[in-house]
Image (cartoon, rainbow, N blue to C red):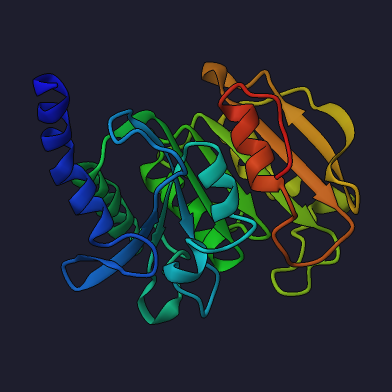
């Protein structure tokens, strides 16, 4: 009984710190802020895998931590969701000296003061402008990132990145009219990940063919597995437009964490 009481007392500061700014209540970090969403059924002790997701233009992190196609998947998989807030509801992703890269890095460190973070399973994601920001973040500060999960957005493929994640996963729709599909020379459909294929020294492409997380959307997967340093690049293409595909984030997290992919 005494041991159980001591354990409960030890857990109180962590729980209180997390709950003080969880969900729609933002966590303050200097003059900026971010949101978090704890996974369902967390025991309050185990290190948490992290998905840091950058919101789209005009949004904020409070939307992300309640988003059906993002938060519902992290909650079910034991993953801590972190959603930074962009200044003026947008991101500075176009150049290497982005003010948002050090901010996002500071967010992860601030979260690690509040909660036990699994440093080996930090995933960085984003949608639209947020996807471009996720690219910029791992380009400048990606050595500790397990995987980039990029949705409907990228940066110019001629950039040179000083760093990079262990794995890259990109999804894009051919009919995207907001951040149009970055078709390569001579109709090269693999151009959205050309930067990483070049930087990682990837060679042979494997066509894994169509797959579905939901019956109403078919994706065509291309994979580069022979990249330097054991890195891997995956590109999922579909005929749709500018959206987060149902089930895509959960499907990637399952595969990255060695689980059988399920929906939702």
Q: Where's residue 116, x and y in %?
A: 26, 35
Judging depth in this view, the residue of 201 and 245 nearest the camera is: 245
Q: Residue at x 17, y 34 (%)?
A: 8
Q: Can you see residue 40?
A: yes
Q: Residue at x 43, y 63 (%)?
A: 95
Q: Residue at x 65, y 55 (%)?
A: 151
Q: Where's residue 100, x and y in %?
A: 34, 63
Picture quarter with the C terminus: top right
Judging depth in this view, the residue of 195 and 99 nearest the camera is: 99
Residue 96 to residue 168: above or below: below
> From the viewer's perspective, is 16 left or right of 190?
left
Q: Can you see residue 194?
A: no
> From the viewer's perspective, is 73 left or right of 7?
right
Residue 19 to residue 201: above or below: below
Judging depth in this view, the residue of 159 and 116 nearest the camera is: 116
Q: Where is residue 10, by image quadrant?
A: top left
Residue 129 to residue 141: above or below: below
Extreme-front residue of the structure: 1
Q: Where's residue 216, x and y in %?
A: 90, 54
Picture quarter with the N terminus: top left
Residue 19 to residue 75: above or below: below
Q: Residue at x 25, y 52 (%)?
A: 18
How many labels sit on residues? 0
């Amino acid at each position: 009984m005494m041991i159980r009481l001591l354990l409960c007392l030890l857990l109180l500061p962590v729980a209180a710190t997390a709950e003080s700014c969880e969900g729609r209540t933002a966590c303050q970090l200097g003059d900026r802020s971010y949101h978090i969403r704890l996974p369902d059924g967390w025991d309050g002790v185990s290190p948490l895998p992290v998905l840091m997701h950058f919101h789209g233009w005009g949004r904020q992190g409070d939307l992300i931590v309640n988003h059906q196609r993002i938060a519902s998947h992290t909650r079910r998989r034991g993953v801590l969701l972190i959603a930074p807030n962009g200044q003026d509801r947008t991101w500075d992703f176009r150049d290497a000296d982005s003010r948002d890269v050090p901010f996002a890095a500071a967010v992860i460190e601030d979260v690690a003061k509040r909660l036990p973070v699994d440093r080996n399973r930090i995933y960085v994601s984003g949608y639209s402008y947020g996807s471009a920001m996720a690219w910029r973040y791992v380009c400048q500060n990606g050595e500790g990132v397990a995987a980039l999960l990029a949705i409907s957005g990228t940066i110019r493929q001629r950039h040179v990145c000083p760093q990079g994640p262990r794995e890259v996963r990109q999804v894009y729709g051919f009919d995207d009219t907001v951040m149009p599909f970055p078709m390569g020379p001579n109709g090269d459909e693999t151009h959205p990940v050309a930067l990483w294929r070049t930087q990682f020294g990837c060679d042979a492409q494997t066509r894994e063919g169509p797959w579905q997380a939901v019956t109403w959307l078919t994706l065509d997967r291309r994979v580069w597995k022979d990249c330097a340093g054991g890195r891997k690049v995956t590109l999922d293409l579909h005929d749709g437009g500018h959206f987060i595909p149902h089930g895509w984030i959960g499907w990637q997290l399952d595969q990255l964490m060695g689980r059988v992919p399920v929906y939702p």
